[in-house]
């Protein structure tokens, strides 16, 4: 996990994928992290609806890395994630 501590447009961290033995692979994904109860206001049977603005969606879809959206519920110590794609 490599946090992006400077102001950014829409990727909060880079995460390096590990192999089955826990070794580094050199493969990265981007992580956009959203924390707060407001992100859990629209429940569905299979999760929640997250409504980002169009400019962020365009940025993530054009990013050189696959980008995952992480919704964090600190109170329950839970993280839910989804790969952002055009489908």
Image (cartoon, rainbow, N blue to C red):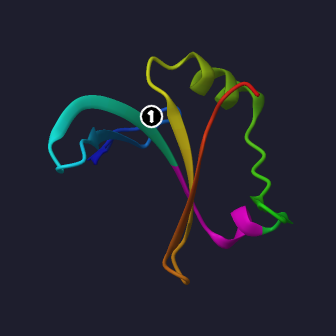
The residue most toward the bottom is 75
Q: Which residues are magenta?
A: 33-40
Q: Residue at x 28, y 48 (%)?
A: 1
Q: Is residue 17 magenta?
A: no
Comparing 42 with 56, the one in front is: 42
20 to 29, vertically: above or below: below
Q: Is residue 5 above or below residue 30?
A: below
* Residue 23 in the image, given as x and y percentages of width and height: 14, 44
Number of labels in the image equals 1
Image coordinates for residue 6, horizontal then vertical, percent: 34, 39
Seen at 17% across and 50% down, the residue is 21
The residue nearer to you, when weighing 77 against 7, is 77
Q: Is residue 38 magenta?
A: yes
Q: Is residue 19 left or right of residue 58?
A: left
- The residue lying toward the viewer, choosing from 7 and 18, is 18
Residue occupying image coordinates x 61% and y 22%: 61
Which element is circle 1 on? loop
Q: Which residue is mark 1?
A: 8
Query: Quadrant location of the C terminus?
Result: top right
Determine crowd level at label 1: few under 14, some 14-19, many 20+ residues with C-alpha closer than 10 A.
Answer: few
Q: Position of residue 37 (x, y in %)?
A: 68, 72
Q: Quadrant of residue 57?
A: top right
Taking the image as shown, residue 87 lies to the left or right of residue 9, namely: right
- Locate residue 46 relative to residue 5 in the image: left or right: right
């Amino acid at each position: 996990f490599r946090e992006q501590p400077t102001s950014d447009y829409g990727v909060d961290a880079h995460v390096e994928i590990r192999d089955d033995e826990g070794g580094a692979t050199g493969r990265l994904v981007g992580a956009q992290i959203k924390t707060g109860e407001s992100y859990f206001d629209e429940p569905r049977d299979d999760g929640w609806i997250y409504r980002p603005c169009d400019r962020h969606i365009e940025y993530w879809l054009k990013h050189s890395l696959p980008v995952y959206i992480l919704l964090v519920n600190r109170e329950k110590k839970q993280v839910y994630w989804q790969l952002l794609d055009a489908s």
